[in-house]
Amino acid sequence: MIINQSKIINTNKLSSYKGTKIRVTLQVRNENLSLIKNVGFKDLIAGERILPSKKGRISIMNAEGFNIVHKNQPKITKYREMEIRRAQWTGGGDWEMVDDIVDVPYKCYPRTRHAPYNIELTILEKDGIKYVVSDELVFTEENDELVKVAVNLFLELFHECSVVKDDFSDLESHTKIIRLCWEILPKGEYPFEERLKQLHPILNRLRPRDRHVIENRLEILHSYKPDSIAIGINGFSGYTIFSYNKKKLYVFESTQPDNATYVFDGDWERISTMTKKEVLEESLQKARIIHLHKTWYKEIHNLLK
């Protein structure tokens, strides 16, 4: 079935597929090459797999998840790291202005975090024709929302798609999968000022008040002399991995101010193939450190000292 519209409100028109395995697909053509490359594919070779870049509401929800706000409940107090300028007494009747990072309280409604849908896209080739395909989806009542999101993801990114009964599984199992999630920065002992220049792609999108806070966290992680640094690309943009090989620790730092730092142990090959959902699942982490100034630095030091 071909769908060519801005979005679908429900899956009623797909009812004939209920109870079957399906994929959402798009045939690669000259006229849609720019759209396909724009979401993160590189060479358009069979096996390239991405979590698509965040281009709109659906792709952001797919990569980042979203909050369900409970406005029927009383507001609660939360804290956000912020940089402030204050006057500091230096003696002899003199004062100087200094910058501090503090935890600032604010009121908000309680929220439940909905995990990212984590729908990844893969280039597969069949009978000489290339396709962008979703993962296999079992179209049940329980998966109705996921199917709708998958279709709307394609419509948001490419403005069209087809829904087909899954016939790519055997082809996929014989294709070498290449996940395009991370870009490893040049190795070596760089001053932090030089590293900041390499991190500009993820820092330039931040508000100034948030940027200073996040730069400070990145500088602390850099001070423990990581063996390598990788920045997330496509749907992983906003994450930086600091690798500490001797300790076999990998620190995922997020540029989102109200997020958390995730710490994993193991090896780079395993870490580099993890999905966004796996990154955020608490059962797989060695530690999850909330972005609170009064505790973050102490917990990081205890892990990396």
Image (tube, rainbow, N blue to C red):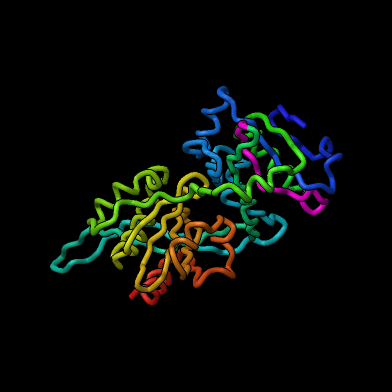
Say left or right for 287 vs 294.
Answer: right
Figure label count? 0
Q: Is residue 87 visible?
A: yes
Say left or right for 171 vs 223.
Answer: right
Residue drawn at (52%, 46%) of the image: 235
Return the x and y of residue 34 as percentages of the image width and height: 51, 28
Q: Is residue 66 visible?
A: no
Return the x and y of residue 215 as percentages of the image width and height: 34, 55
Nearer to us in this view, 152 or 182: 182
Highlighted range, magenta: 128-143
| Vertical order, 67 against 33 (above or below) | below
Return the x and y of residue 286 as percentages of the image width and height: 50, 72
Nearer to us in this view, 160 or 203: 160
Q: Is residue 249 magenta?
A: no
Asked where in the image residue 10 lies, by quadrant, the reply is top right
> Which quadrant of the rendered structure holds the N terminus?
top right
Asked where in the image residue 85 lies, by quadrant, the reply is bottom left
Residue drawn at (37%, 52%) of the image: 184
Say left or right for 145 vs 206.
Answer: right
Nearer to us in this view, 227 or 223: 227
Residue drawn at (29%, 65%) of the image: 225
> Which quadrant of the rendered structure holds the C terminus?
bottom left
Return the x and y of residue 98 as percentages of the image width and height: 26, 59
Asked where in the image residue 303 lies, by quadrant, the reply is bottom left
- The residue at the far left in this view is 92
Residue drawn at (67%, 62%) of the image: 74
Nearer to us in this view, 129 or 146: 129
- The residue at the far top in this view is 31
